[in-house]
Image: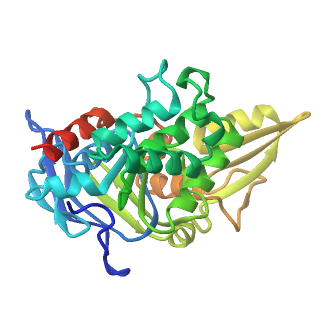
Amino acid sequence: MNRATTQLDATSPSIEVRDLRHVYKGGHVALDGVNLTCGTGVYGLLGPNGAGKSTLMRILCTLIRPTEGYVELCGYDVTRQHREVRRLIGYLPQDFGGWRSHRVIEVVDTLAQLSGLFGRKARRARVEQVIEQVGLADAAYRKVKQLSGGMVRRLGVAQALVHEPRVLVVDEPTVGLDPEERIRFRKLMEEIGRDRTILLSTHIVADLGAACREISILDTGRTVFSGSPAELFRSSVGAVFELITSPEMADKTEQNHEVVSRISTGDQVTLRAIASEDGLPPGATRVDETTLEESYMAFMSARGRASVARQDGELIDEPSVMELEELKIKEAVS
């Protein structure tokens, strides 16, 4: 069985997408010429509501066939060699639930079997190893309903990694997590991304963290940006301003500018916002160093899309982890 331990050239891309197009019944064009290349490391997939992120994930997970284009995962064609692809991919959906009465170790063990790990002794060793890797060893015999939100997300990572996939696809990784758990999750992604490809699909730009090698932005089914975080930073030079003013003037400014952050201190408000075509409001100064979120908002603002840059969700249902794992086990025993 050709498992995720397949050795690839370090310079070979794990994900290769070229001129990908997908049209749903009824004529809705979800993807229209998407290009994407991912090697080892953490890659970010950003885009507003309806951009096509969920459709792209479904195609990568072999759950739907693209209308046109070329998609390879670790050298395998996702359309013609879907069995091989499913053995090499792990998936963590936005909502990893349905296991509340099961213990952590039971959840990972069950999904390990669905991934084709049938040998009891080897499977047990792998299950314990991956639970340790994600920092849940002390909670292995706790029921899922007793876990914090962050621990449930780490459990989701464990089930996605248990069959040692070469590629991990993660959807909205930190939704509902507190700041401490969000930081812990980013560190975990950085650690496990050292020897595999991780594709993070998110609308929370800060989720990508310092470990992110490249970012791709989808908008209306097209790739509108692909490059390093540094390139995205450079694209926003001069586009973000800071203004310290009264609450009344801050409210007025928000009516004409896309505000990234608003901090109130006493009778003053500090705004950081995106400059408009009319320039800066009185008293504002341009920001020399922007955050990744500000750079993304500025990029989308230039496209006339800043107002949807923070929106959550997709028009198309996201893939189900059980849907993918059930396909794996059916093929493993066939």
Q: Quadrant of residue 92?
A: top left
Q: Is residue 263 left or right of residue 267?
A: left
Q: Residue at 38% across / 71% down in the picture?
A: 39
Residue 20 at least partly seen: yes
Q: Is residue 19 left or right of residue 158?
A: left
Q: Residue at 33% across / 37% down in the picture?
A: 321
Along the viewing direction, whichever of 43 and 324 lies nearer the viewer? 324
Along the viewing direction, whichever of 151 and 17 lies nearer the viewer? 151
Q: Give the mark count.
A: 0
Q: Quadrant of residue 35?
A: bottom left
| Figure coloring | rainbow
Question: Which x, y percent locates residue 312?
Answer: 45, 35
Q: Is residue 285 left or right of residue 229?
A: right
Which part of the image, by quadrant, shows the N terminus?
Answer: bottom left
- Residue farthest to the top, as pictured: 101
Image height of 151 relative to 186, above or below: above
Question: Which x, y percent locates residue 174?
Answer: 55, 40
Q: Residue at 39% across / 51% down in the picture?
A: 122
Q: Quadrant of residue 279?
A: bottom right
Question: Which x, y percent locates residue 212?
Answer: 52, 64
Q: Residue at 57% across / 67% down in the picture?
A: 233
Image height of 289 relative to 330, above or below: below
Image height of 153 relative to 231, above or below: above
- Residue farthest to the right, as pictured: 266
Q: Is residue 138 left or right of residue 40?
A: right
Which part of the image, by quadrant, shows the C terminus?
Answer: top left
Question: Which x, y percent locates residue 264?
Answer: 82, 36
Image height of 99 relative to 240, above or below: above
Residue 202 at least partly seen: no
Along the viewing direction, whichever of 253 and 227 lies nearer the viewer? 227
